[in-house]
Image (cartoon, helix red, strand yellow):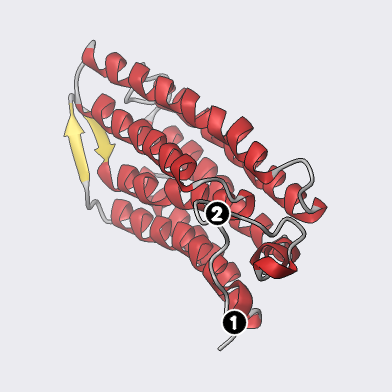
Amino acid sequence: MTPETWFWVGAVGMALGTLLPVRDAIRNPSHRRFDAVLAGVTGIAAVAYALMALGVGSLVVDGVTVQLARYADWLATTPLLVLYLAMLSRPSRRTYVALVVADVVVIAAGVGAALVSTPEKWAFYAVGCVAYAGLLYGLLYTLPAALGGDADPRVDATFTTLRNLTVVLWTLYPVVWVLAPTGVGVLQPEMEAIVVVYLDFISKVGFVAFAVLGADAIDRVAAPASERSDAPASSGRVDAPAVDDD
């Protein structure tokens, strides 16, 4: 199967994954802003994969095809995944902005590494790895600290599941990048497409599925501040968005 075939598989899979938060938003209007973030993740990815399948946004650099639509997808969707984790843990806005900046640097460094030749590409790759280390610290330590040790058990369980899924799978992407034609070329383009589609599907559709299954956690986070046991959140926190049922 060609990479384009796998891109179509990715497009269909992401589109089907988008139905999960859409269905939840219809059935539970109070979840709709959380579900909008989730639908944005898989919806954007579905469009990106369709564009890659059609050959839009591809660029050949030193004989290697670079899928710019893929990097655009990651640039848009990974901050949304971080946003969802922040909506559960409610850190300061400064913390969220710092995590997004680190995330953007990781993706931008990946684009730079893919578009230049050796040895510059490895300099970009190193910059991305340093930024990713900062992002990992935020996901593993800063956000859990914001969530607090006395967090609602269901919210804590949902956050931890989604955070762990994200950390494990995101850590595999730099490895695949090195093994793919963009790096040392151990993986052929077809195998790279298979691996990345699989990682994208689990890291996005898997995230969305677990988040929808954790809808009771959303109910507790989305409750008015006066109804939460940890209510006195400051205005500087990334709190759950206001909810109304109209």
In the rendered image, the quadrant that contains the C terminus is bottom right
Q: Mark on residue 84? A: 2
Q: In the depicted view, which residue is nearer to us: 52 or 40?
A: 40
State the quadrant of the N terminus: top left
Q: Quadrant of residue 191?
A: top left
Left or right: residue 3 compared with residue 167: left
- Using the rendered image of the protein, determine whether residue 246 is visible from the camera's viewpoint: yes
- Of residues 231 and 1, the one nearer the viewer is 231
- Taking depth in this image into account, of 147 and 122 the one nearest to the observer is 147
SS at badge 1: helix
Does 54 sit left or right of 77 as displayed?
Answer: left
Rendered location of residue 164, percent (x, y): 66, 38
Q: Answer yes or no: do the residues labelled 2 and 1 have beta carbons within 8 Å? A: no
Q: Is residue 152 left or right of residue 48?
A: right
Q: Residue at x 60, y 68 (%)?
A: 20
Q: Amino acid at mark 2?
A: Tyr
Q: Residue at x 21, y 28 (%)?
A: 115
Determine which quarter of the picture holds residue 32: bottom right
Compared to residue 159, the image places residue 192 above or below, namely above
Type of residue at label 1? Answer: Ile
* Crowd tier of the residue under label 2, counting other residues whose Cα lies within 10 Å: few below 14, some 14–19, many 20 or above: many
Can you name the residue that lies furthest to the top here?
119
Mark 2 lies on a secondary structure that is: helix
Residue at far bottom of view: 246
Return the mark for residue 26. 1
Q: Position of residue 211 (x, y in %)?
A: 65, 58
Q: Residue 197 placed where, x, y %?
A: 48, 45
Residue shown at the point (59%, 34%) measured from the top left: 142
